[in-house]
Image (cartoon, rainbow, N blue to C red):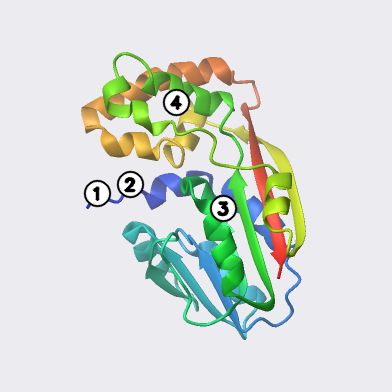
Amino acid sequence: MSRDMWDPATYDRYADERSRPFFELLARVRADSPDYVVDAGCGTGELTTELARRWPESTVDGFDSSPNMITRARSIDGATPSFAVADVTTWHPDRPVDVLVSNAVLQWVPEHRDLIERWVEALSPGGWLAFQVPGNHRAPSHAAIRELCASREWLDRLGDLDRGDPVGTPVDYADLLSGCRVDAWETTYVHILQGERPVLDWVSGTALRPVLDRLRPDEAERFTAELAGLLADAYPAREYGTPFPFRRIFVVAQK
């Protein structure tokens, strides 16, 4: 079994920026009094507790494939959701789900279109599916990671990590969910990041995790040092910080 590649502290470095899309997604879910609510890929659990605050009479469960994340989630003071370690590709509820939320998870699942169809089947009549995924595969940050992975030094170790853009367009998901009432859109946020290597810090919590998972500490240090230079060129700092455009795809569907 491979080691858990998710570090909650690294992921939380930009917690405010990462949580904003969750709330904008959730604002489009019109469920009044759902009986059962699930957060698929709940991470550290803070946002799962927001589901419990919105629907205090509901049973709220969160699951994530990372034991580190679930350990963190279970340590939240006063948290009412239940948290479990589970894989989104194999998880199946033992009862109909009224609201199923997935925040920045499905981009890690190449076969997620099949998964979305299974999740719709798991919804109760009138139930809601809401998910958002980063749409930054073609951004300079991700292009720089791919460039390094394909370089002579790293090709043997990391060359197979690029499997193409896993994320569809809003229209792709509207087509996929044509049997539901669908609200699909995209937004590009311009995050103003601070620090000496802010974009590297950002991707270290997400897009860079599969790379770092394969490298020894000395190799990771060498890789990130080279990547930092590429990212600094792609995202030059201003006096007020470093602008970092980040595109996201949102989908809300009612069965």
Q: Which mark is nearer the camera, 1 or 2?
A: 1
The residue that disc 3 covers is: 113
Q: Is residue 125 above or below residue 86?
A: below
Circle on res. 2: 1
Q: Amino acid at mark 4?
A: Ile
- Graded by Cα atoms within 10 Å as few (under 14), some (14 to 19) or many (20 or more), the crowding at tag 3 reads some
- In the rendered structure, are the residues bearing label 1 and label 3 in contact, judged by CB atoms less than 8 Å apart? no
For label 1, the SS is loop
**At label 2, which amino acid type do we have?**
Met
Mark 4 sits on what residue?
145
> Which residue is pictured at 72% across the width and 51% down the height?
175
Alpha carbon separation for disc pair 2 and 4: 17 Å
Callout 2 touching callout 3 (CB < 8 Å): no
Element assignment for label 3: helix
Q: Quadrant of residue 44?
A: bottom left
Q: How many marks?
A: 4
Name the residue carrying label 2.
5
Of mark 1 and mark 3, the one earlier in the sequence is 1
Task: Tell which tag, 1 or 3, sits nearer the viewer.
Answer: 3
Q: Is residue 64 above or below residue 111?
A: below
Mark 1 or mark 4, which has the lower sequence index?
1
Dot 2: element: loop
Residue closest to the eye, 119 or 233: 119
- Residue at position x 59%, y 62% from top? 117
Is disc 1 in contact with disc 2, using a CB cutoff of under 8 Å? yes
User: Splitting the image into 4 quarters, where does residue 102 fall?
Assistant: bottom right
Marks 2 and 3 sit apart, C-alpha to C-alpha, by: 24 Å
Classed neighbour count for the residue bearing mark 1: other residues with Cα under 10 Å, few (<14), some (14–19), many (≥20): few
Where does the image place residue 214, in percent across and percent down from the top left? 27, 36
